[in-house]
Image (cartoon, grey):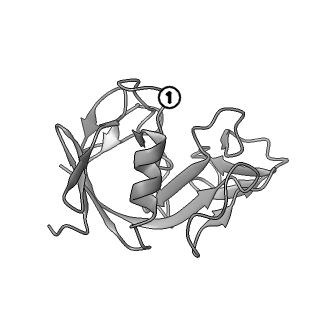
């Protein structure tokens, strides 16, 4: 492990000499992640992308991509687009990336079960803004908004996310 790694600890995520409080999946950590189980998967994951709401903030980094009004994330394991960015209209199960609330205003994407997804092993694990301290996610890792922005500004593609 290096200071450039995002490391989930019992106190939060350690990164560049700081520890950031965070929330994880409602079911805790799991070594056998499944779609819909609410767990945060253990392992070493890589940051693969950065999405942001251009109508709510300036581009945070040069490699950030804006979220479009029709952008969705497929969580339908029976499709070829499982755990992929898709566009509306999309009739299969999905998450809307352009939400009314601020949870996905800024999202770091990971390589969990991506780019070649195994059906049922769980869709996207994002790093995003939390609802409030202590409120669990569906498996993602969530932070206070200003902490997430600090992390994003120092996280290039390929950064390791280590979840023990």
Q: Rate crowding at label 1 as few (under 14), some (14 to 19) or many (20 or more) other CA atoms within 10 Å.
A: some
In the visual, does 103 lie left or right of 40? right
Q: Residue at x 48, y 62 (%)?
A: 114
Residue topped by disc 1 = 131
In the visual, does 32 lie left or right of 105? left
Q: Residue at x 45, y 60 (%)?
A: 152
Say whether residue 85 is visible: yes
Give percent across and percent down for residue 119. Answer: 50, 50
Give percent across and percent down for residue 85. Answer: 66, 58
Determine whether 74 is above or below 36 in the image.
Answer: below
Determine whether 29 is above or below 136 in the image.
Answer: below
Give percent across and percent down for residue 151. Answer: 39, 57
Q: Residue at x 45, y 65 (%)?
A: 153
Give percent across and percent down for residue 8. Answer: 23, 48
In the visual, does 27 lie left or right of 66? left
Outermost residue on the right side: it is 89
Kindly indicate the quadrant of the structure image that contains residue 133: top left
Kindly indicate the quadrant of the structure image that contains residue 81: bottom right
Q: How many marks?
A: 1
Say whether residue 121 is visible: no
In the visual, does 29 lie left or right of 69? left
Q: Residue at x 60, y 59 (%)?
A: 51
Q: Secondary structure at mark 1?
A: loop
- Locate the N terminus and report the quarter of the image it occupies: bottom left
């Amino acid at each position: 492990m290096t200071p450039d790694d995002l490391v989930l600890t019992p106190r939060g995520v350690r990164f560049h000499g700081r520890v950031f409080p965070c929330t994880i999946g409602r079911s805790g950590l799991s070594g056998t992640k499944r779609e819909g189980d609410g767990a945060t998967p253990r392992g070493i994951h890589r940051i693969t992308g950065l999405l942001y709401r251009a109508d709510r903030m300036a581009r945070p980094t040069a490699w950030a991509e804006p979220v479009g009004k029709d952008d969705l994330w497929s969580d339908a394991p029976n499709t070829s687009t499982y755990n992929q960015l898709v566009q509306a209209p999309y009739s299969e199960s999905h998450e809307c990336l352009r939400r009314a609330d601020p949870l996905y205003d800024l999202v770091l994407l990971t390589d969990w079960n991506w780019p070649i997804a195994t059906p049922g092993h769980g869709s996207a694990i994002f790093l995003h803004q939390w609802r409030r301290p202590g409120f669990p996610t569906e498996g993602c890792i969530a932070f206070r908004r200003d902490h997430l922005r600090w992390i994003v500004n120092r996280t290039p593609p390929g950064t390791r996310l280590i979840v023990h």
